[in-house]
């Protein structure tokens, strides 16, 4: 699984097709989508238009709460694979636990079956708290490959990251640049480091994710920004710079979308 990929929310099919094709042409190999984004068809078209062989690409998608169940997860796979126009999905995630309906363990059992059948190459979770993950493992005996969570320098999720590392689960950041707000790009600490390094603020934040050992999928439909976001791997931040950025954390789960209350 590549360390950095392209996020596609909230692009529509046409925008996603163009963004994905351009990103792959620039060197991206990980593409992140979801049924709920409504752009899986566009993502699939963009992958095809890129001309890069399917086996060189890594595509992630996610299923919704209406697909929580063993049989429902099979149908969700067929639907998403059809929209993406692929035979296999590299990583299939449960988008939110939706604990109120209490069916996420059955949904995960459905993912395990898809994994055993070879229709997906890896399985995982998104927005699951440690208690949710513990239950999945306890009731299925299968450790998820990935948990994709909301994470940026103001929401460092240190306890969750430690827990996932102890379980051997890859931690993947969504909204790595802080969402639609540009506050992080204008933060004094980040802009100071960016100016000193001759980098963009976004590059500094994304490199911070890399220094923490995370996988992340920033969204951009702009070709120049896509190239900038990918240019992270021939330089690094110092320990002091990482610490200064980490110090922007608001503490606990302040600002984090609560998956006990929200989900789709």
Image (cartoon, rainbow, N blue to C red):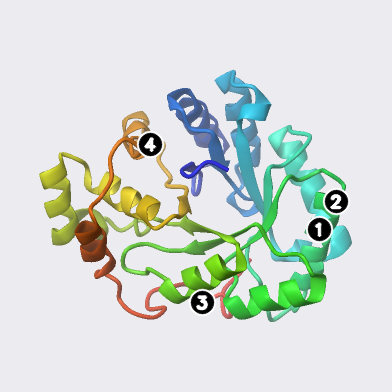
Q: Is residue 134 visible?
A: yes
Q: Quadrant of residue 169?
A: bottom right
Residues at marks 1 and 3 touching, judged by CB atoms closer than 8 Å: no
Instruction: Point out the image quarter for the C terminus.
Output: bottom right
How would you rate the neighbour count of disc 1 (Cα within 10 Å): few for under 14, some for 14-19, many for 20 or more? Answer: many
From the viewer's perspective, tell me whether residue 125 is left or right of residue 185.
right
Q: Residue at x 77, y 72 (%)?
A: 105
Q: Would you name the residue on which mark 3 appears? A: 258
Instruction: Name the spot of residue 208 as percent of width and height, x first.
Output: 32, 54
Earlier in the chain: of badge 1 and badge 3, it is: 1
Mark 4 to mark 3 CA distance (whole Å): 30 Å
Q: Is residue 98 visible?
A: no
From the viewer's perspective, tell me whether residue 251 is left or right of residue 245.
right
Q: Residue at x 42, y 78 (%)?
A: 253
How would you rate the neighbour count of disc 4 (Cα within 10 Å): few for under 14, some for 14-19, many for 20 or more? Answer: some
Mark 2 to mark 4 CA distance (whole Å): 33 Å
Residues at marks 1 and 2 touching, judged by CB atoms closer than 8 Å: yes
Residues at marks 1 and 4 touching, judged by CB atoms closer than 8 Å: no
């Amino acid at each position: 699984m590549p360390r950095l990929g392209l996020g596609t929310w909230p692009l529509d099919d046409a925008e996603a097709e163009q963004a994905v094709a351009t990103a792959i042409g620039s060197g991206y190999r990980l593409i992140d989508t979801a049924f709920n984004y409504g752009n899986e068809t566009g993502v699939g078209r963009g992958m095809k238009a890129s001309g890069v062989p399917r086996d060189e690409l890594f595509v992630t998608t996610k299923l919704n709460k209406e697909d929580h169940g063993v049989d429902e997860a099979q149908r969700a796979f067929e639907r998403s694979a059809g929209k993406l126009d692929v035979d296999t999905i590299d990583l299939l995630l449960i988008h939110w636990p939706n604990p109120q309906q209490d069916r996420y363990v059955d949904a995960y059992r459905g993912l395990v079956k898809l994994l055993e059948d070879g229709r997906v190459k890896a399985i995982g979770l998104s927005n699951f708290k440690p208690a949710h993950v513990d239950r999945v493992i306890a009731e299925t005996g299968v450790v998820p490959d990935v948990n994709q969570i909301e994470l940026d320098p103001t929401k460092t999720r240190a306890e969750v990251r430690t827990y996932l590392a102890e379980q051997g689960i890859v931690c993947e950041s969504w909204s790595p640049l802080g969402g639609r707000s540009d506050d992080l790009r204008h933060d004094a600490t980040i802009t100071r480091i960016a100016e000193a390094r001759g980098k963009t603020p976004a590059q500094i934040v994304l490199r911070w994710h890399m220094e923490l050992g995370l996988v992340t999928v920033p969204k951009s439909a702009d070709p120049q920004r896509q190239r900038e976001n990918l240019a992270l791997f021939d330089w690094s931040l110092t320990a002091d710079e990482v610490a200064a950025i980490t110090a922007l954390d608001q503490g606990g789960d302040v600002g984090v979308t609560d998956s006990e209350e929200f989900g789709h």
